[in-house]
Amino acid sequence: MRFGLVGGGRWAGVHREALAAVGAELAAVLVASPASAERVSREWGVPATTDPERFFAAGFEAAIVASPNYLHAEHAVACLEAGRHVLVEKPMATDLEGCDRVLAAARAHGKVVAVGLEMRVFGLFERVKRLLDEGAVGRPLHLRLDLWRRPYRAGAGGWKSDPAKLGSSILEEPIHYLDLARWYLAPAHGEPRAVEAWATERPQAPAAWENLDVRLGFGAAQALVTRSLAAWGHHVSLQLVGEEGALRAAWEGEMDLDPNPRQRLTLQRGHGPEATLEELEVAPSGHAFDVPRQAAAFVAAVRTGSAPAATAADGRASVALCLAVERALATGGRVTL
């Protein structure tokens, strides 16, 4: 399949490598400046342009949108209106109106839209989902997800430090873990009903919500998501308790793209003195592996009609959760969904 790519930054480069890994062809790149076009053409060996007409004239079936957050909805809609299927990076938009514009364009033009919530194909967390679906721990009751990592990169031109372009620091990375919580718990309990959140920040990182705690209420179940940016390396852990057992998972690397991470998944069958523990094998995990898996799932969705890893509806739901977290932080209270 031939692709166009919107964006020429670091993460766009990760998508370029993922397309090559799954045997797809990158036909053209759309960037913001002539300097970026010259650099991308030289370094990637792919035609790059600032002109949307020249970009779409390259004749590709699908586009990946990996521009700064505030442009995601605009670029996704433009690609859909040009008759292309779209994989749009998270967040799908920085507000619900933008999400709805993307959904409407997808319906109007009959195209597939996938959203880059790639933790759903992260080997470790995908295995947790399969175990849940198989009933390995019974109905899930309590979930905890913790992320401990080094501060974010600033992004080209420092856009990740500009709230008008970022949208919200919650939309930048906690969105992945809020989405996982919904993915794991909503099938058994329905959509989350309430959100509470607490956060702290340092003068060096204003409005970044450097240390964040979020509680999601799912009726008979709850999820706690925490994130710290004042750390080293990249460390993610999961604890999930069900009516008939529990799961504990951990992933550690020097960075999110570490090709040689350390990971572990333990299944507890039963509770109390009769419980047994089993260490499980897991497919390689980390963005070095899950972004190619996401690309493969998107190609399959276009070719066969199968569901992408995360649909446009999932993308909208994840943005709604993030905006609810922001409201909870702003008001210091409980937000009902």
Image (cartoon, rainbow, N blue to C red):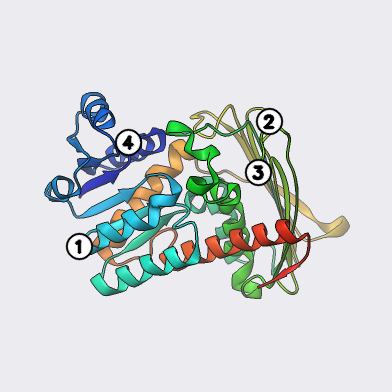
Choose mark 3 or mark 4, whichever is in front: 3
Nearer-the-camera pick, 248 or 276: 248
Nearer-the-camera pick, 198 or 147: 198
Q: Residues within 10 Å of mark 4 (few under 14, many from 20)?
A: many
Residue with the mark numbered 2: 204
Q: Residues within 10 Å of mark 3 (few under 14, many from 20)?
A: some
Determine the CA span between mark 2 and mark 4: 28 Å
Labels 4 and 1: the sequence-earlier one:
4
Labels 3 and 4: the sequence-earlier one:
4
| Left or right of 113 in this view: 228 | right
Secondary structure beneath label 4: loop
Q: Residues within 10 Å of mark 1 (few under 14, many from 20)?
A: some
Determine the CA span between mark 3 and mark 4: 26 Å
Amino acid beneath label 4: Gly
Amino acid beneath label 3: Ala
Residue with the mark numbered 4: 8
Residues at marks 3 and 2 touching, judged by CB atoms closer than 8 Å: no
Residue at the (19%, 44%) spot, across then down: 51
Amino acid beneath label 2: Gln
Residue with the mark numbered 1: 83
Determine the CA span between mark 1 and mark 3: 38 Å
Residues at marks 2 and 4 touching, judged by CB atoms closer than 8 Å: no
Labels 2 and 4: the sequence-earlier one:
4
Residue 272 screen position, x and y as percent = 86, 58
Nearer-the-camera pick, 194 or 17: 194
Residues at marks 2 and 1 touching, judged by CB atoms closer than 8 Å: no
- Quadrant placement of the C terminus: bottom right
Determine the CA span between mark 2 and mark 1: 44 Å
Residue with the mark numbered 3: 207
Choose mark 2 or mark 1, whichever is in front: 2
Residue 115 screen position, x and y as percent = 42, 57
Secondary structure beneath label 2: loop
